[in-house]
Image (cartoon, rainbow, N blue to C red):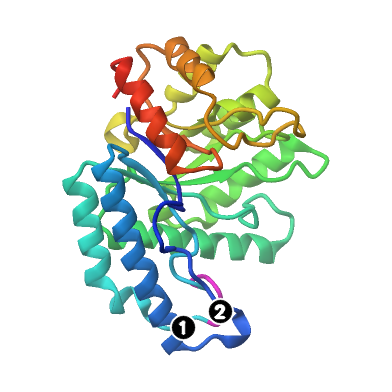
């Protein structure tokens, strides 16, 4: 098991997601911002390796406006060697990487422009991993999208876009995550049947909405969609309910007894775990300690 956290390291005095307003876009500003973001990403990766956290989600904002028509600069060529060095560091330390496009990425939208924008964003994020030279166990993680009053048709529309519009380089990395409102594990397994995409399992979302599957069985069902030689082992997101808050709100800090229980419940199952907990690396460090004590790392 590799354990990690998404995008932001609170302990460090830098951000890999610096951006600027669209109205102030120019190439000089783009280059300067990407340089800063990539330098900070390197620092985050080094921090994580030093502290035994070998799973990391790279921010969608690494290259500002990368999928927007305003950005016509060949940033891929400009930063080619920097990306390659980052990828070499990731591979030499046996790290696992993912990216999670924002909520505007909806492949089953009835709006044609939304679908085109979504694909452009997926192409950008996939190209980051390609530039790093990472294999296809580095994944792009999205949600099923909307139901639009007819979930079965929405699922079919997702599959049609997948097969007819997505580049192979994106399809090789794409996976779908069960969400906390609309797309259950069962719905994501249906998408897997139609597309071959592996299913990222989110334990907290499964607690919010499910079809009655016990937790261990649910993990096993998601894990069965991952082909080791192509996808690596199961990626999953872990969190829990914030006490006294609305249903679905993520906890501020890891609830250690619940995490210990989840690891005990999934004993013997291989997975890499992304902690979607608000205090980021602070909880991830505690999770590493707990998982290590149980022989899970």
Q: Say which quadrant the C terminus sits in.
A: top left
Question: Which residue position is annotated with label 1?
Answer: 72
Whether tag 1 and tag 2 are in contact, CB under 8 A, the answer is: yes
Q: Look at 27% across and 59% down and name the residue there.
A: 132
Q: Is residue 67 magenta?
A: yes
Residue 9 rendering spot, x and y as whole percentages:
43, 52
Magenta extent = 66-70
Label 1 crowd (10 A; few <14 / some 14-19 / many >=20): few
Q: Look at 27% across and 37% down and name the residue there.
A: 52
Q: Which mark is residue 69?
A: 2
Q: Which mark is residue 117?
A: none
Q: Along the horizontal axis of the image, is 71 left or right of 48?
A: right
Above or below residue 257? Residue 95 is below
**Residue 111 figure quarter:** bottom right
Above or below residue 149? Residue 215 is above
Q: Nearer the viewer, residue 266 or 277?
A: 277
Q: Nearer the viewer, residue 152 or 206?
A: 206
Q: Look at 26% across and 71% down and name the residue there.
A: 80
Q: Is residue 149 visible?
A: yes
Q: Along the horizontal axis of the image, is 12 left or right of 134?
A: right
Q: CA distance from mark 1 to mark 2?
A: 7 Å
**Which secondary structure lies at badge 1?**
loop
Most prominent secondary structure in the magenta stretch?
loop
């Amino acid at each position: 098991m590799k354990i990690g956290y998404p995008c932001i390291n609170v302990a460090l005095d830098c951000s890999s997601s610096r951006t600027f307003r669209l109205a102030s876009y120019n190439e000089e500003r783009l280059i300067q911002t990407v340089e800063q973001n990539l330098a900070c990403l390197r620092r985050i990766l080094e921090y994580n390796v030093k502290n035994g956290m070998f799973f990391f989600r790279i921010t969608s904002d690494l290259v500002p406006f990368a999928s927007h028509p305003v950005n016509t600069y060949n940033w891929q060529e400009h930063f080619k060697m920097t990306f390659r060095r980052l990828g070499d560091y990731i591979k030499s330390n046996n790290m696992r990487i993912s990216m999670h496009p924002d909520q505007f990425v909806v492949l089953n939208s009835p709006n044609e422009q939304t679908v085109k924008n979504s694909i452009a964003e997926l192409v950008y994020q996939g190209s980051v991993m390609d530039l790093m030279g990472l294999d296809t166990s580095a994944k792009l993680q999205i949600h099923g999208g909307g139901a639009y009053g007819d979930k079965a048709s929405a699922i079919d529309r997702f599959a049609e876009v997948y097969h007819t519009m997505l580049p192979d380089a994106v399809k090789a990395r794409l996976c779908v995550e069960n969400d906390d409102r609309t797309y259950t594990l069962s719905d994501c397994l249906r998408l897997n049947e139609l597309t071959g995409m592996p299913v990222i399992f989110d334990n907290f979302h499964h607690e919010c909405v499910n079809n009655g599957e016990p937790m261990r069985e649910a993990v096993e069902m998601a894990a069965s969609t991952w082909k080791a030689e192509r996808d690596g082992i199961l990626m999953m997101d872990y969190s829990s309910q914030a006490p006294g808050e609305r249903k679905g709100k993520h906890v501020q800090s890891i609830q250690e007894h619940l995490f210990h229980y989840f690891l005990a419940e999934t004993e013997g199952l291989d997975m890499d775990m992304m902690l979607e907990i608000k205090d980021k690396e602070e909880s991830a460090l505690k999770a590493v300690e707990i998982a290590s004590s149980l022989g899970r790392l």
